[in-house]
Amino acid sequence: MSRPKIRLHVEHPLSAGQTVDLSRDQANYLFAVMRLGPGDGVALFNGRDGEWRASVAQAGKRAGVLSVETQTAPQQDPPDLWLLFAPIKKARTDFIVEKATELGAARIMPVQTEFTNAERIRRDRLQAHAVEAAEQCGGTYVPPVDDLARLSDVLADWPADRQLVFADEALVGAKRALSDAAPDVTKWAILVGPEGGFSEAERARLRALPFVTPVSLGPRVLRADTAAVAALTLWQSERGDWR
Ligand code: SAH
């Protein structure tokens, strides 16, 4: 049986014999846009139960039912890595959420820093971007996107057993890599600042915290969205699930 081309995220529990009622949007997408009909295959995942092959049992204009058949991939969660980033312009923030999902972040945490312009975010929109990214990249996990929180509050509440990789633009060009930091720690996070960078007060506070490892991302100053991708890539290849 060929692998279904369409992957869909659903909230429903997935196991053999289950039926899944489609939302209006999903029915529209499968039957009006993608032109699927009864018997056609769809790959489903819900972020918990791996990937399943399902087939169309009923197809309507505004509704439909899928019938779940067999598991095609086990659940694969990313390493325990959070991405903290300062929201920037809308399209670039969307990009960061999409790339963090593809690159395997376990949790996405928008944080407000001193030089962050955005006062609010559309959490639901960003979450939808994470779902879409997981659908297209073949992942079975969708990272939760948190509400915007102040960086200072997040740091005040920080769990002692989690290391924070601080992408510090003041280290541009320095040889401060991640390689040797905290070899036994399995819980990690990455912090990337806004276009304006971090304030001196933020930098001093971060550098003084015992769980923080400041790193350089090379000899050039990267834009915030590039920095997020670079830092995730660096961590995944040295510490994460690319090894
Ligand atoms: N306006 C700042 C740069 C901000 S770049 C300045 O001119 O100094 C946005 C964010 O990307 C930074 O806060 C930092 O987290 C990250 N970043 C960009 N380039 C970096 C580098 N070479 N090393 C470490 N972090 C970097």
Image (tube, grey):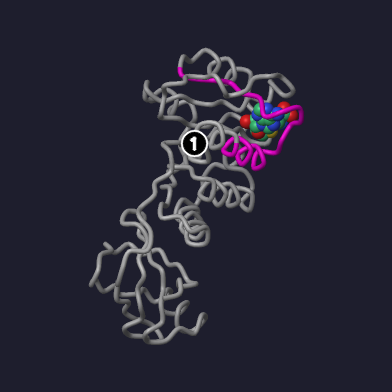
Residue type at mark 1: give it.
Answer: Gly
Q: Does residue 222 belong to the magenta stretch?
A: yes
Quadrant where ligand 1 appears? top right
Q: Name the residue furthest right.
A: 220
* Residue at left offset 29%, top offset 76%: 67
Q: Is residue 167 left or right of residue 186?
A: right
* Residue at left offset 35%, top offset 59%: 46
Could you say which is closer to the camera, residue 36 or residue 117? 36
Could you say which is closer to the camera, residue 168 or residue 68? 68
Q: Which residues are magenta?
A: 211-233
- Work out whether residue 40 can be spotted: yes
Whole-percent x and y of residue 172? 72, 24
- Work out whether residue 196 can be spotted: no
* Residue at left offset 26%, top offset 62%: 13
Q: Is residue 222 left or right of residue 94?
A: right
Q: Is residue 50 left or right of residue 128?
A: left
Q: Name the residue furthest left.
A: 17
Q: Does residue 77 belong to the magenta stretch?
A: no
Residue with the mark numbered 1: 240
